Image: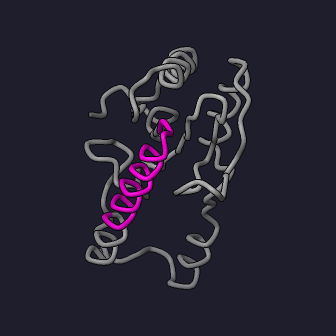
Amino acid sequence: MADIVSPGKRSEMMAGIKSKNTKPELVVRRLLHAEGFRFRLHRKDLPGRPDIVLPRFMTAIFVNGCFWHGHENCALFRPPLTRTEFWSEKISGNRARDARKQSELTDLGWQVVVVWECSLKGKNKLPYGELAQLLADSISNEKKCHHIRGRECS
């Protein structure tokens, strides 16, 4: 199927997609602050430049968009039907980089929490109270890597 907008307009639309301070990231920050957690943002000295860092708990939080990070079995991730080779390489590259940076963080003694976009929006989103509890539990847990997903995502 052909794109319904011109290449120039598509380029403009894609350029408008933010990588920092996204709506899902702001929701997670509000929940953490309401639970009494204090944090730093986008620390450049840590691998992967985590979205949220809780130094006291040695915890790095990434808020991942389901499309950009290729969240498997998720209603919010559907591979594009055009330029499939480009998008396949792009998304698999993002996944490989995510895994590498998370591994580097855990090797440095940091705990990693990944909050997927589907836990914050869409038909499978978690209630804010449940999400806040999962975040708090993940931060205080000894496990090295946690993934918080929407209800029906595996």
State which quadrant residue 46 falls in.
bottom right
Can you say which quadrant of the picture contains the N terminus?
bottom left
Q: In screen coordinates, is 62 left or right of 107?
A: right
Q: Nearer the viewer, residue 86 or 78?
A: 86
Q: In screen coordinates, is 32 left or right of 137?
A: right
Over which residues does the magenta segment extend?
A: 92-112
Q: Position of residue 138 (x, y in %)?
A: 48, 24
In the rendered structure, does residue 98 fall within the stretch colored magenta? yes
Can you say which quadrant of the picture contains the C terminus?
top left
Q: Nearer the viewer, residue 1 or 58?
A: 58
Q: Position of residue 103 (x, y in %)?
A: 38, 50
Magenta part mainly helix, strand or loop? helix
Give me the residue at 59% from left, 70% from top. 13
Give me the residue at 63% from left, 42% from top. 52
Q: Above or below — where is 12 with respect to 43?
A: below
- Residue that extends furthest to the front in the rendered view of this protein: 108
Q: In screen coordinates, is 99 left or right of 117?
A: left
Q: Position of residue 39 (x, y in %)?
A: 71, 35
The coloring applied to the image is: one colour
In the rendered structure, does residue 32 fall within the stretch colored magenta? no
Give me the residue at 34% from left, 54% from top. 70
Q: Above or below — where is 54 with respect to 99?
A: above
Give me the residue at 49% from left, 18% from top. 137
The number of discs equals: 0
